Amino acid sequence: MLDKLITEVRNRNTTHLDRMSTHDILSTMNQEDRSVPLAVSKELDRIEQVVKKVIQALQSGGRLIYIGAGTSGRLGVLDAVECVPTFSTPPQQVIGLIAGGKKALTEAVEGAEDDETLAARDLAALDLDAKDVVIGIAASGRTPYVIGGLKYARKAGASTAGLSCNPKAQISRYADVAIEVESGPEVLTGSTRLKAGTSQKLVLNMISTASMIGIGKVYENLMVDVQPTNKKLVERSKRIIMEATGTDLITAEQFYLKSKSNVKAAILMILLHCSLDEALIRLNQANGFVRMAVESPSSIEKRANDLNEV
């Protein structure tokens, strides 16, 4: 089976890799990497379908759950973990599962990815239900752990998607939406942490970011739901307030404190000249969307109705 996978085919441009100078190796890798965004662009329609499913799930109290093994699993965990500080999502709203559990994040867990039943057990432990979206990630498109997870997710009534780097991937058979990014043969034969991994990272970036925009976590191009858990993020929060309102840093700092570190509320307090309580009420009426909150009540109602129709 492996010899039929594009990700396992030898790359004709790199058959003399061991004879190349360091500079030529780097130049070749860079050249090969340039093809990845183009490959991803061919799957934008499928990625959009997945994003819409995720937005609907998150608005309905569901979760986004990534499942994968090896590099694919680690990329899913990475994307899930980053949603908490970037968008202030609850830790259990976006989840990454990797074959072999936490130990597999830093070392190989032999045989874990070959067990179809393991993902089913992992998903069952999360009380998976029909409100959730499960995205299976496998560069080869044939990882048993991912296949087993997608099968279980379907039985549970959850929405499913597959992200692979080979056409006609096995995991696509068990996915409502199949994203197949043909990133091509790797510079180092079969090392799917390279172009395949890059393509997966790009797609996961798109899915999580676009989904969070879709549920009101972004104003303009600012991460207004950032979680200020360290000094850097506190300063970033103040700068976000400043950028969003056109005010100076001193004023932004004052309203950051007045809003009790609520960046969205601070922005509304400045733009609408209102109290914290009023800002929170408007945010609640606008389902957390800052742009909707600064508009008229009729606009809020119209936008809310539009979102309910997604």
Image (cartoon, helix red, strand yellow):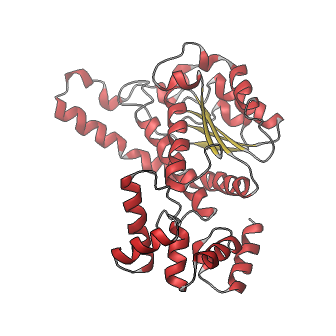
User: The C terminus appears in which quarter of the rendering?
Assistant: bottom right
Where is residue 95 drawn, in percent x and y? Answer: 62, 40
Q: Residue furthest top?
A: 110
Q: In which quarter of the view is residue 140 placed?
A: top right
Where is residue 59 drawn, in percent x and y? Answer: 72, 58
User: The N terminus appears in which quarter of the rendering?
Assistant: top right
Q: In which quarter of the view is residue 124 placed?
A: top right
Say which of 144 and 12 sits in front: 144
What is the tally of numbered marks visible in this picture? 0
Taking the spot 73% from the left edge, 20% from the top edge, the residue there is: 117
Where is residue 243 drawn, in percent x and y? Answer: 40, 74
Say which of 53 and 180 sits in front: 53
227 sits left or right of 23 in the view: right
Taking the spot 75% from the left edge, 52% from the top edge, the residue there is: 61
73 sits left or right of 160 in the view: left
Say which of 78 and 21 sits in front: 78
Taking the spot 58% from the left edge, 73% from the top edge, the residue there is: 290
117 sits left or right of 213 in the view: right
Taking the spot 46% from the left edge, 51% from the top edge, the residue there is: 229
Where is residue 172 drawn, in percent x and y? Answer: 68, 36
* Position of 91 relative to 264 (above/below): above
